Image: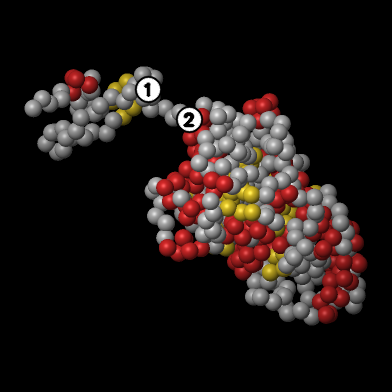
Amino acid sequence: MPTFEDSDFGVQTPLSPTKKTSNNLNVAIPTNGDASGTVNSVEVPATRSSISDASAYMHNLSLSPSMRDRRGSRNSFGTSLPIPRSKRQSRLSSVHYPEGQPQRPGMPPIQASRDILASQMQDLSSEKVHAAKDMAFVFDIDGVLVHGDRLIPEGKRVLEILNGDNELGIKIPHIFLTNGSGKPEEARVAQLSSILKNPISTEQFIQSHTPMRALADYYKTVLVVGGEGYKCREVAEAYGFQDIVVPNDIIAWDPTIAPYRVFTDEERATSRPRDFSKINIEAIMVFSDSRDYATDMQIIIDLLRSENGRFGTMAKDPVSQRVPIYFSQGDMLCPTEHPFPRMSQGTFRIGLEAMYRALTGVDLERVVYGKPELATYKYADEVISSWMETIHNDEKLPKNIYMIGDNPASDIVGGNQYGWNTCLVRTGVFQGGDNDEENPASFGVFPNVLDAVKTAIRKEIGKDFKFEFNDQINPVLHGNGASAIE
Ligand code: G3P
Ligand code: MG
């Protein structure tokens, strides 16, 4: 039986495990021999370049030229990102308390005298009160306040201070702006409140997909992708989408669509199959991280290549008949309990873009919400001024806004572009030196969120500002209130 010689393939032996590639790069090749020097396998030269094909298909997070130049149809898809007109996130907003009932973080149980005392302090310090109401904090969540379900301890203390445990006994405005996703706002707020041991309202909370509720006015039947179980269906229902399809509904209708998927009886029983060959899906919304890349990518690609979103068809023109696709955020990586950040929606999207380009020869046009997209920051402004009305009965946008984030490529670049003060913390994605080289934080880099907040408050309200409320001293009885609480 003929056998292969190394010389047949131009392969060097393991004794000289370095060879020149076509790019003249020295690539170390692992040896494949055993201890006796016997070679157990044959190395066949690659006929394809080892350099990724995908790089040519990658897009920045912002509008790509192809979107600007080519597309003006489908509700100006890609040329603008709709956000809700209403400042209120929901008519059914709710506050969540860590123990299920109202508490005053960092302070004794509710007592009428404490409010009187705080208002006396505020009368005596009107300049400080004015400054406290003219600043606001915008908090990133993952990597700043928590890591997944784990508290970053300084995050709890920060919220205590901003909720009134400060020398004025005043609420200093703050909202939460996260690229996180995958569950209804109310559920996520309840979970966060319990981890951070502070009350949080849905009115001060924005997830990556929160502004996408505006899209419910544009599309009736939508495919919603990502998240655990059917939680993103719940999110879309809460946003007012009328006809929501999720990948499980499609697999239950035709399991051959996802050949590698093991579909459980429970999934079958809880899905909502229909004859999708008779339904046009008008848009694709990737709300959260895919839990099954193979299935979700296959279904999304099928739909993008179909005639106007109908399964079982293949569009003759992949551009004019293609349904729009939206992603709730574009982060490449997300810090979790794992020592190294995990891949997030951005990497999933780039994979899809490369697959789509490879299969059709054209670039995929898509919209990406979330930080650092301008629409998300504009929406945050609306939420801040609405929250000001709730806590201080004054619907205005404070002048000095501080974004505190751990990810230069989303939190910081977006905040800088929007003219906010930006603070980068070292408790999450950023692991660099003095500041991020590409997107430096304008207000500086801090070891943690508490240092950032204290520095910002001292700048805006005064170097001597006290970060706790003193219940013992009555400023009226003790003369000058500010000095009475030394
Ligand atoms: O990257 C995904 C998301 O979990 C990041 O959340 O709070 O850091 O914007 P956040
Ligand atoms: Mg973060």
| Frontmost residue, 242 versus 379 | 242
Q: Can the viewer see residue 398?
A: no
Helix, strand or loop at label 2? It is: helix
| Frontmost residue, 210 versus 337 | 210
Mark drawn on residue 25: 1
Type of the residue with mark 2: Ala
- The residue lying at 73 percent from left, 79 percent from top is 109
Residue wearing tag 2: 358
Image quarter (top left, top right, bottom left or bottom right) of the N terminus: top left
Type of the residue with mark 1: Leu
Mark drawn on residue 314: none
Q: Is 249 located above or below residue 331 in the figure?
A: below
| Residue 141: x %, y % from top left | 63, 55
Q: Is 199 located above or below residue 242 in the figure?
A: below
Horizontal side of residue 46 vs 289, given as left or right: left
- The residue lying at 60 percent from left, 57 percent from top is 233
